[in-house]
Amino acid sequence: MAVVVLAPNAFKGTIGPLAAAEALAAGWARIRPADALRLVPMADGGDGTLEALGAAGPAAAESAVVPGPVGGVGPARWLRSADGTAMLELAATGGLALLAGSRLPSRRRAAEATTAGFGTAVRIALQRGAAELVLAIGGSASTDGGAGFLTALGARLTDRDGDPIPPGNTGLAALHRIDLAGLVPPPARGAVVLTDVTNPLLGTAGAAVVFGPQKGAAPEDVPVLEANLARFAARLAEVVPVEPERPGAGAAGGLGFGLAAWGARIVDGAGEIARRVGLGAALAGADAVITGEGRFDDQTAGGKAPARVHALAAAAGVRPLLVAGRIDAATSGWADAVALVDLAADPAEAMRDPARWLAEAAATLATRFPA
């Protein structure tokens, strides 16, 4: 009998980490029913983070209505554990996926999207008694440097006339003064920011250059986004010590920078989640671990969940197995690997029924696993 840990990330846009782990378990058990299976869904601060954290222990769901990323309002949902830890995902309140039906041109969305909704959700969570915050900031729609977040928590960002600036990156062009006197502080046990990137706020590896085009910015928009973020950084530095060069400041369109200025601690998302879900303990005494994500490529090693699982498995002497929707990078260092697109009739079929093909992938791995 073998002990196998199932620790997949979400397969973006198709299936969450818990359902993915359950599908892998079903496929493996079909071939090796006597094996002991430990389900430990993983994430890295992006899609599926709340699902992974929620699966690790009891947590109550909370909700509120908050501003949308480009106007209007929408629902925000988060989890709160018995010890008062509130866990929130930016993607659920200000995520790029929320703009799929927006009538605004993509360039305007990139320039005008705000993090105010996320800030509002955090403020409400604090008002309801959150003693600690775990903030997952993957999948953002904005490039406002966290200006909207800070505004929602009581900061005043004004122009030369003393009037509030417009939301989004575009409003930063008019920024003249920042007043943090009314800013709500982080909770007693602090705020932890989960991210899978280490980009700084500014420069060729910064928020505007790297992530602006992903949010809809045209090439000619990027220098404008960059200049506005630089203006925000300069004004914010006048009232609080903050370093735009710090790793992770450019995460989520610069929200990492605003959160750091607020007093939050930016950490490696996959590493922190692994600690909170008890992955290290689950690997103790295990024979193999299966992890994966929608697309395994060269970016995976930069901080994605499968890379963290692989590292922990190597340290524990556990055989690492990989399942991914697509495999577009070398799998050296993995004991075995299966791509769903190689099992399904076509890629679209793999995305239509990911649970089925995840089970098939696990069954394939189990068949090839040493007795």
Image (spheres, rainbow, N blue to C red):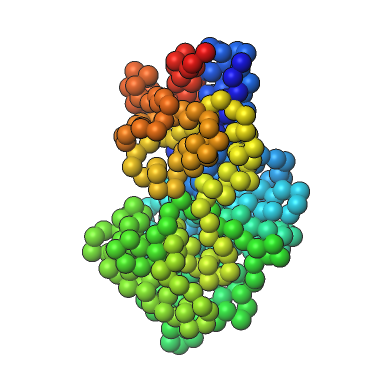
In the displayed image of the protein, which residue is found farthest to the right? 82
Which image quadrant: the N terminus? top right
The residue lying toward the viewer, choosing from 163 and 338, is 338
Q: Quadrant of residue 30?
A: top right
Where is residue 82 shown, x and y percent of the image?
76, 48
Q: Nearer the viewer, residue 166 or 354?
A: 354
Taking 20 as reference, is 51 above or below it? below
What residue lies at 43% left-to-right and 87% top-to-bottom? 160
370, above or below 162, in the image: above
Does residue 13 appear in the picture of this structure?
A: no
Q: Is residue 209 visible?
A: yes
The answer to which of 49 and 96 lies nearer the viewer is 49
**Quadrant of the image occupied by residue 340:** top left
Instruction: Give the residue drawn at x 45%, y 41%.
Output: 307
In the rendered view, would you say 313 is above or below 235?
A: above
Task: Please provide percent x and percent y for residue 61.
Answer: 68, 45
Say if 175 sits above or below 126 in the image: below
At which x and y percent is residue 267? 53, 56
Which of these two is toward me, 357 or 172? 357
Residue displayed at 44% across by 66% down: 246
